[in-house]
Amino acid sequence: MDGADRSGEGLAVEERIEQRIGAWPADAGEARALQERLAPLVRQEALDTGAVSLVAGLDVAYAPGDDRLVAAAVVLAAPEWEAVDSATVVSRPRFPYVPGLFAFREAPALLEAVAQLRTAPDALVCDGFGLAHPRRFGLACHVGLALDRPVLGVGKTPFVGRADAPAPERSSWTPLLDGGEVVGRCLRTRSGVKPVYVSVGHRVDLPSATALTLRLTPHYRLPEPVRQADRLCRKRLAAA
């Protein structure tokens, strides 16, 4: 595994984002308007999850009492889901803390970490949400649209909507509903363990996102790429 540490403010990434999705917002109002404008561009399409052999997990850790964050991207290879590449970026958010707008704090650093990878993943998994968002455009959608790659979001608790508890067996699921609309799935990845919440980011549909999440959880509740990204960014933060 590469394990390289890279630092930066993500300016080059923001320029690339602007080329793909428009000008970077100056405030919360502009950010919400941008999400509403971009939401219709999300593509939901079937993904051949059996052919996916390289998956990147993305996660962010914040320094307590500080304004720094560390973004990590870790690429795992099937079938054992062993790490083959990784990158971290230490940055300072350029956007305030506003619920529903975390992507504007985290996406630049995450995309910078992805850009530093030497291995191109077939799909990416964010610790967070995609369509399961008030404006149907969460972090996984931001990342997916910026990269134009298959991206899904997996969260530990729902940000929007409600779901009945799925059956206790692994692979059981129930729809995550918000305002009568299906925005994700409440998925049991381990028998008798709390479920996770899966949603589409871009270039994947909900059945494919569910199937890939189950492939990525052979031993633990959370997808292995996200688990390893979480460990890496916290390790890097402790050393920063």
Image (tube, helix red, strand yellow):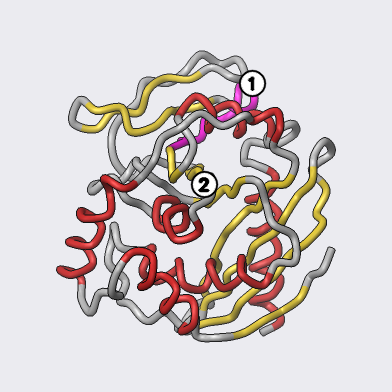
Q: Residue at x 82, y 56 (%)?
A: 84
Q: Is residue 190 magenta?
A: yes
> Under tag 2, what secondary structure?
strand
**Percent position of residue 146, x then y:** 44, 61
Quarter holding the N terminus?
Answer: bottom right
Q: Is residue 46 left or right of residue 174?
A: right
Q: Position of residue 8 (x, y in %)?
A: 56, 86
Of the residues shown, which amino acid type is indicated by label 1? Ser
Task: Name the residue at 52% across, 82% down.
Answer: 91
Asked whether, in this view, residue 138 is left or right of residue 78, the answer is: left
- In this picture, is 63 found above or below 177? below
Which quadrant is the C terminus positioned in?
A: bottom right
Q: Residue at x 55, y 68 (%)?
A: 61
Q: Which residue is mark 2?
A: 151
Name the N-terminal-most of marks 1 and 2.
2
Task: Write down the quadrant of residue 72 in the picture.
Answer: bottom right
Relative height, residue 219 to residue 36 (above, below): above
Circle 1 — which element?
A: loop
For label 2, the crowd category at 10 Å Cα-Cα, with few meaning under 14, some 14 to 19 and many 20 or more, is many
Tag shown at residue 191: 1
Q: CA distance from mark 1 to mark 2?
A: 25 Å
Residue that lies at the very extreme toward the front in this rendered image: 19
Mark 2: amino acid: Val
Q: Residues within 10 Å of mark 1 (few under 14, many from 20)?
A: some
Could you tell me how many numbered marks the image carries? 2
Residue numbers of the magenta segment: 189-199
Q: Nearer the viewer, residue 186 or 165?
A: 186
Q: Which mark is residue 130?
A: none
- State left or right for residue 4 relative to residue 89: right
- Percent from the top left, x then y, of residue 4? 76, 75
